[in-house]
Amino acid sequence: MGRPSWRTVSLRAWISVGIAVTVLPLLVFALSHAIVTRSVIADFQRVAGRERDQLIPLQQLQASLVVAGASMERWLRAGDSAQATEYHKVRDQIETRFARVSAAVVSEVDASASVARAGADWTAADRLAALMTKMKEATGDAKVAAMADVIAALVDQRAAMEEHCAMMMKMMTSP
């Protein structure tokens, strides 16, 4: 009998096969990495970007609206001027946050319309707060009754804004 066929192959051929067996897994890994990077990671980046650009500012806006309403209510009930200062500080933040959320959802028609409605509700509530500030400085039973009406209107406005924000969150988190 003759020599086995694997012994007839030259050393150069064996080295070439060894290098190919070594490099082939690296090429497979590089190819699979490219596919994963382009597909799966891109989806995660899109979701993370949406959270960063839309959802987090929206949640910050909601929190600011709650703080503003609570500050104004505490100021009206207790007369603490620090609460009025807190309201004015938060009011400026709310304006900035509305602008940021509006810019983030400009490409989404429904969300953009909801942000515009919530912004209009906020403007109305802020006007009511300014009216309440003026009424608080006055005295008399008529002023107290009018102030109670304004507080009720403000609470209604706040509820409408929270409803708009909740609707926007639902729209943004749906696929």
Image: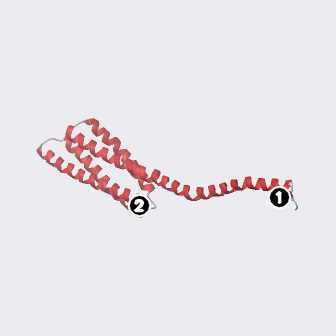
Give residue 39's position: percent from left, percent from top. 57, 59
Count neighbours of disc 1 (C-alpha within 10 A) and say few if under 14, some if 14 to 19, many if 20 or more: few
- Left-right relation of 158 to 43: left
Residue at left offset 11%, top offset 44%:
141
Which label belongs to residue 6?
Answer: 1
Give residue 130's position: percent from left, percent from top. 26, 46
Q: Nearer the viewer, residue 66 or 77?
A: 66
- Residue labelled with disc 2: 174
Count neighbours of disc 2 (C-alpha within 10 A) and say few if under 14, some if 14 to 19, many if 20 or more: few
Q: Quadrant of the C terminus?
A: bottom left
Q: Quadrant of the N terminus?
A: bottom right
Q: Marks 1 and 2, Cα distance to the nearest angstrom?
A: 62 Å
| Residue type indicated by callout 2 | Ser
Q: Nearer the viewer, residue 24 or 170?
A: 24
Foreground mark, 1 or 2? 1
Work out whether mark 1 precedes mark 2 in sequence or the reverse, and give the earlier one.
1
Residue at left offset 25%, top offset 50%:
128
- Number of numbered callouts drawn: 2
- Left-right relation of 32 to 48: right
Residue at left offset 67%, top offset 57%:
28
Query: Against 5, is 90 above or below?
Result: above
Q: Nearer the viewer, residue 1 or 79?
A: 1
SS at mark 1 in the image: helix
| Residue type indicated by callout 1 | Trp
- Left-right relation of 91 to 19: left
Give residue 31's position: percent from left, percent from top. 66, 58
SS at mark 2 in the image: loop
Pick out the residue farthest to the front.
Answer: 1
